[in-house]
Image (tube, grey):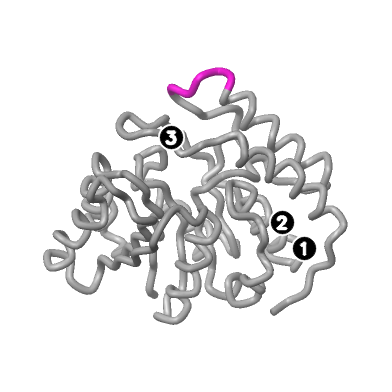
Amino acid sequence: MKKLVIIPTYNEIENVEKIIRAVLALEEGFDILIIDDGSPDGTAAAVKGLQEEFSGRLHLLERSGKLGLGTAYITGFKWGLAQGYDYIFEMDADFSHAPSDLPRLLAACTEGGADIAIGSRYCNGVSVVNWPIGRILISYFASVYVRKVLGFHIYDSTAGFLCYSRKVLETIDLDKIRMKGYGFQIEMKYTASRLGFKIAEVPVIFVNRKEGTSKMSGGIFGEAFWGVIRLRFRKFKKK
C-alpha cells in the first residue's frame, strides 16, 4: 500500500526540512512530494539537499511561480496517480497540521471505510490554537455558509488536511476543477460527495504556524464565496 503526502510550498525555508523529517519518521512509511512554486528563499534547494538521504521517498516538483494552491494539488494528484500511489494526502508545510495525525486519517479510510478522510477543526467544537479570533470566525462561518448554500453536511469544508483514496482521484475529472485558492478545498469535497463517495471527518487540533508567513489573501475568500454559488448549479459527472 503506497502512501503519498503532498506538501505545496512557497517560502517555507524555516519549516521544510523539519516537516520532511517528521513525516518520513512515521512508522507507516509515507512518501512526500514537495511542490514548490519558485520560492526565492531557497526552499527547493533545501529539499534537493535531503533527497539523497531519503532516496526514493522524497520527491520534488518545481514550478515557475505562484500558480495557486489548487493547481499545485492537481499537479500532485496526477503525479501520484501516475506513480501508483493508493492513498494521497494534502498537508501544509508549517506544522499547522500535525504529522502524527496522518495515520489517523489513513485509518479512517483503510479501517473505517471512508473514501476521503478530513482532518477537521470543527466537527468536535472549535479546535484551533493561536489563531486571531477574526480568522477563526471567518473560517468557521465559511464552512457554515457552504453547508447552507450547498446543503453539504461537512463541518470543515475548507480544511486542507486530507486523505484521498486512489479511486476518488481517478473518478473526479481533475481538469474540470476550477477554483485555485482555498475554494479548491470546497470544490473537491463537494464534487466527491456528489459523485457518491463516503467522507469522514477526523477531529484534529489545528495550530497556527510559528515560523514563516501566511499565504492568505482577500482574493482567496472572494473566489470561494462566488465559487460556492456556482457549485450550487453545476452538474457533476464521473471522469
Residue 190: which disc?
2
- Determine the CA span between mark 1 and mark 3: 31 Å
Given residues 123 and 193, the one toward you in this image is 193
Q: Mark 1 and mark 2 in contact (Cβ < 8 Å)?
A: yes
Q: Is residue 66 magenta?
A: no
> Compared with residue 152, is residue 222 higher up or lower down, i.e. above or below?
above
The x and y percentages for residue 233 are 87, 57
Q: Is residue 129 left or right of residue 137?
A: left
Q: Which residues are magenta?
A: 130-134
Which residue of the protein is positioned furthest toward the right in this rendering? 233
Classify mark 2: residues with Cα within 10 Å, few (<14), some (14-19) or many (20+).
Answer: many
Q: Residue at x 30, y 32 (%)?
A: 211
Amino acid of disc 2: Tyr
Read off the residue under disc 3. Answer: 214
Q: Earlier in the sequence, mark 1 or mark 3?
A: 1
Q: Is residue 169 left or right of residue 63?
A: right
Q: Residue at x 16, y 60 (%)?
A: 50
The x and y percentages for residue 106 are 45, 59
Read off the residue under disc 1. Answer: 194
Secondary structure found at label 3:
loop
Report the mark closest to the observer, 1 or 3: 3
Q: Residue at x 69, y 44 (%)?
A: 224
Q: Is residue 165 left or right of residue 191?
A: left
Q: Earlier in the sequence, mark 2 or mark 3?
A: 2
Secondary structure found at label 1:
helix
Quarter containing the C terminus:
bottom right
Q: Residue at x 12, y 64 (%)?
A: 53
Report the mark closest to the observer, 2 or 3: 3
The x and y percentages for residue 216 are 51, 36
